[in-house]
Image: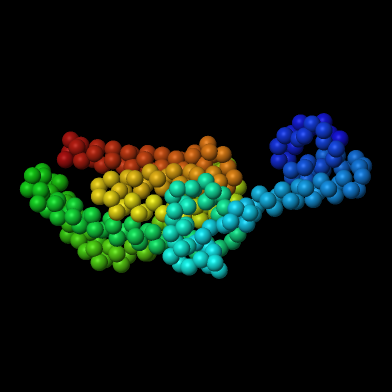
Amino acid sequence: MTDYENCPVCHKELPQQLEANFCPFCGVRFDPNAEEPVELVEKSKDDAEKKREKEQEPAEELGGIPWENRADLGVVQRLTQTWSESMFNPVHFFRAMPRRPGIGLAFLYGLLFKIIGAIFSVYWQQGALENLEQTLQDVPAGMREFFRMALENPLFASPEIQLLVAPFIGAFTMFLVSFIFHGAMLITGAAKNGYETTFRVVAYAESTAVFYALPVVGGWIAFIYWLVLMVIGNREAHQATTGQALSAILLPIFLCFCLISVSLFMFASALFSPGN
């Protein structure tokens, strides 16, 4: 019926013995003037529509996410099962994640783990600050003054204030990070679905905040595992390639690293300039 090897619209490879004048994947008509049996046309349209529905609603077929299954599971079951699946079976978890509108439940899940991470961070930070106070006398005068200013800052000195503002900072960072990474995914062509899908990935990737319970290395482990979940989550949720998802995650990090490097260079140049 057609001389195309690939569909000119969805670019998928066409079957060698294509009997219809429609692409069996997206339903586009190759030759508007060609005539073919009505039942063949309808069959091609139905097949294309069923395929689109299957790609757009994988969550129903794969079971969805436990945290959003309020009808059959209790809160503790929903929380523990979601954490376990997101951490140890992320491919299936994010593939099953709903694409429907609404981010309320995902937001609550992510915010809960943001607060958990903040509690552990504040606990270990207080121990580090106490040790820092004991070793300030061995630090050069300039750095000693800097550390004293930091220790006198209420946000660092008061764990109560840190825990009080943690939910607001957590909520803000989730929305900001989602916005940044979704923009990067649009640039790399990985964003097959909307911003809400990216936000859900960011929120459920916060499962890694439990690693903040580990002293010293907990934050690094949480961040690295979070990056892994972000790549897997965006790849599966947006039906993108690993290269596209990885590029979208690394692009903002690379730009942030460049900005920090330039800022440090300018600060060092001003600090050690001949006039100072």
- Name the colour scheme: rainbow
- 144 or 199: which is nearer to us? 199
Counting from the top left corner in percent of width and height, residue 111 is at 41, 61
**Quadrant in which the C terminus appears:** top left
Q: Is residue 62 left or right of residue 177?
A: right
> Residue at point 39% right, 51% down?
208
- On screen, residue 136 above or below 261: below
Residue closest to the eye, 87 or 247: 87
Q: Position of residue 19 (x, y in %)?
A: 85, 37
Quadrant hosting residue 117: bottom left
The image shows residue 67, relative to residue 245, as above or below, that is below
Q: Quadrant of residue 98?
A: bottom right
* Residue 192 vs residue 80, the one in the foreground: 80
> Measured along the vertical axis of the image, is residue 189 above or below residue 83?
above
Is residue 146 rendered to the left or right of residue 22? left
One can see residue 149 in this view: no
Residue 264 appears anywhere in the view: yes
Above or below residue 30? Residue 163 is below
Image point (37%, 64%), residue name = 168
Kindly identify the residue that appears in the image at 49 percent across and 39 percent down.
247
Residue 16 image point, x, y percent: 79, 31
Q: Hey, which quadrant is residue 159 in on the image?
A: bottom left
Query: Which quarter shows the N terminus?
Result: top right
Percent x, y of residue 26: 74, 45
The tally of labels here is 0
